[in-house]
Image (spheres, helix red, strand yellow):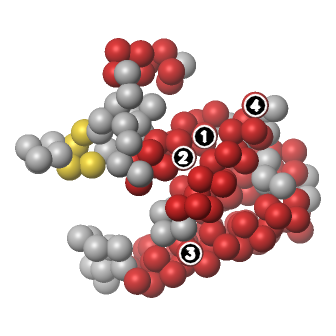
Amino acid sequence: MTAELAAPLLALRDHDRQTRERLRAAGRLFGTYDDEMQAVHRDNAHALDALVEHHGWPGLSLVGLEACRAAWLVAQHANCTPALQRKFLALMIAAAEIGEVPARQVAMLTDRVRFNEGRPQVYGTVLDWDAGGQLSCTLEDPAAVDDRRR
């Protein structure tokens, strides 16, 4: 594990969390995508992209589980940079195939990308309010979702 690569990922995660908590406490996270939160997500996505360009996806053997999770969080929150979010997903899929990324991270990012693109989800991890006021999601092949989740 490379602590020099883990530390910046953990710092990105912490900046996201601290900003989110401060904005939540101020009532600025409800109803709209706050400009300050969006800026953190955008800046974090670009910082992750720079790291990925030099070192590849920060998988388990490279940065450890906690920093691997931090990289996933940055990718998961990269909604305002959809091309980067799709790039991160492709890198995570490849890393998961060799055991470097937990499969659940790939599942959640897959659904986030599909949700953001208005496409049905594969695993059903992103819920949103439907027209009837219920939390739900649109699934691709709902009959097989439990098999895919396994």
Kind of element beneath mark 1? helix
CA–CA distance between discs 4 and 2? 15 Å
Frontmost residue, 80 versus 59:
80
Q: Which residue is mark 4?
A: 97
Name which of mark 3 and mark 4 comes first in the sequence. Answer: 3
Frontmost residue, 91 versus 26:
91
Is the residue 146 above or below the residue 19 in the image? above
Residue under the point 27% across and 79% down: 27
Q: Which residue is mark 3?
A: 42
Is the residue 73 above or below the residue 65 in the image? below
> Percent x, y for residue 54?
88, 65
CA–CA distance between discs 3 and 1? 20 Å
Residue under the point 35% across and 15% down: 143
Kind of element beneath mark 4? helix
Kind of element beneath mark 3? helix
Frontmost residue, 27 versus 54:
54
Q: Which residue is mark 2?
A: 109
Tell me whether the residue at label 1 lies in contact with that at label 4, contact meaning CB atoms closer than 8 angstroms: no
Q: Amino acid at mark 3?
A: Arg
CA–CA distance between discs 1 and 4? 10 Å
Q: Amino acid at mark 2?
A: Leu
Residue under the point 42% across and 21% down: 145
Q: Which residue is mark 1?
A: 106
CA–CA distance between discs 1 and 2? 5 Å
In the rendered image, which quarter contains the C terminus?
top right
CA–CA distance between discs 3 and 4? 27 Å
Is the residue 73 above or below the residue 147 in the image? below
